[in-house]
Image (cartoon, rainbow, N blue to C red):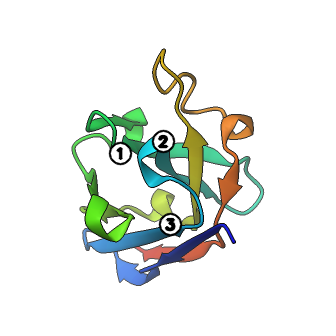
Amino acid sequence: EVQLQASGGGLVQAGGSLRLSCRASGFPFEDYALGWFRQAPGKEREAVSLFYHGDGSTHYRDSVKGRFIISSDGAKNTVYLQMNNLKPEDTAVYYCAAKLVYADGVGRWTDQYEYAYWGQGTQVTVSS
């Protein structure tokens, strides 16, 4: 059974930090890139970051560069998103997702329709 178990959300003041975790099971971790999306109320889901364990590559949306760090523990099939200097506009439900990676690379990592598996969301709320 494919599972993506996300955890680590919560309520934090602006400027604070949170670390999200996403543990994957039921599919070959090394063949997939794991990413984070978020969706705020009334807004479309947007890509936040991606990690591909195969080559260690990382991707970030511009608004989180320098504040968020994505990493992976291959032994635990887990991807982490360290979120620092959080801002109220980071408030959203954060989703973990897995994308099959082909020989030509991770492709359009921001396209949610390219992701095969999704975890449940975890709420991140940043107060001002």
Residue linked to disc 2 = 31
Distance between the Cα atoms at labels 1 and 3?
Answer: 23 Å
> Seen in the image, is 72 located left or right of residue 37?
left
Residue linked to disc 1 = 64
Q: If you read the primary sequence from the N terminus, does the residue marked by circle 1 or circle 3 appear first? A: 3
Crowd around label 3: few <14 · some 14–19 · many ≥20 (10 Å): many
Foreground mark, 2 or 1?
2
Question: Eyeballing the image, is 22 above or below 54?
Answer: below
Distance between the Cα atoms at labels 3 and 2?
Answer: 12 Å
Can residue 14 be seen at all in this image of the molecule?
A: no
Residue type at mark 3 is: Ala
Residue at left offset 52%, top offset 66%: 91
Whether residues under marks 3 and 2 lie with C-beta atoms below 8 angstroms apart, the answer is: no
Foreground mark, 1 or 3?
3
Expressed as whole percent of the image width and height from the top left, the position of residue 22 reads 45, 68
Which element carries disc 2, helix, strand or loop? helix
Q: Name the outermost residue toward the top.
A: 104
Question: Eyeballing the image, is 106 above or below 10?
Answer: above
> Seen in the image, is 56 located left or right of residue 60?
left
Residue linked to disc 3 = 24
Expressed as whole percent of the image width and height from the top left, the position of residue 8 reads 41, 80
Which element carries disc 3, helix, strand or loop? strand
Closest to the observer, 29 or 91: 29
Q: If you read the primary sequence from the N terminus, does the residue marked by circle 2 or circle 1 appear first? A: 2
Q: Name the outermost residue toward the bottom.
A: 11
Residue 78 lies in quadrant: bottom left
Residue at left offset 57%, top offset 76%: 122
Q: Quadrant of the C terminus?
A: bottom left
Closest to the observer, 91 or 83: 83
Expressed as whole percent of the image width and height from the top left, the position of residue 85 reads 25, 61
Residue type at mark 1 is: Val
